[in-house]
Amino acid sequence: MKRILAIFVLFFAFGLSSYAQERNENFVTLAKKDSKDVVTLLQLGDKEEIDFFNLFYYKYDEQSKTSSDERKKVIANVITKKLEASLTAENFDKLKRNTALFERVIN
């Protein structure tokens, strides 16, 4: 009986960890795409791309933890403020004018 329970627990733990890893890889892919698109549009360097990758990864991770629309609006507001703080006013305006990209990276 103990062996059956142990096997069940290991099977469940393996399934849960593989699901978390899949989700993690998806966040990495999405964050890389967003950061690459922003850096390409604004003609920034590698350091900024890494910073934006971390920001967008954080966004996807936080959004996955909630289903509340209010919380998602708060996350979008935080991302907007962080983008505004890290970019020059000229670059932030350029990003905002590209509405499709701007909406994708904040939401």
Image (cartoon, rainbow, N blue to C red):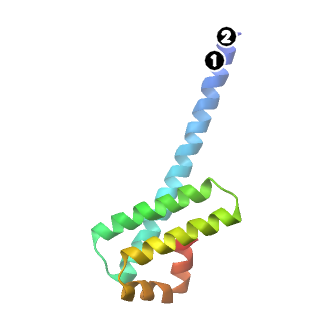
Circle 2 residue = 2
Q: What residue appears at the point 57 percent right and 65 percent down from the top-left corner? A: 75
Q: Is residue 67 left or right of residue 97?
A: right
Q: Which mark is residue 41?
A: none
Q: Is residue 65 left or right of residue 41?
A: right
Q: What residue appears at the point 65 percent right and 12 percent down from the top-left corner? A: 3
The three-letter code of the residue at mark 2 reads Lys
Position of residue 62 relative to residue 105, above or below, is above
Q: Residue furthest top?
A: 1
Q: Nearer the viewer, residue 102 or 90?
A: 90
Q: Is residue 53 left or right of residue 16?
A: left
Are the two marked residues, 2 and 1, in contact with CB atoms closer than 8 angstroms? yes
Q: Is residue 77 left or right of residue 50?
A: right
| Residue 31 location (% of width, % of height) | 47, 63
Question: Which corner quadrant of the image does residue 49 belong to?
Answer: bottom left
| Residue 7 location (% of width, % of height) | 64, 20
| Residue 46 location (% of width, % of height) | 28, 69
The three-letter code of the residue at mark 1 reads Ala
Point out the image quarter for the N terminus.
top right
Q: What residue appears at the point 37 percent right and 78 percent down from the top-left corner? A: 87
| Residue 15 location (% of width, % of height) | 61, 36
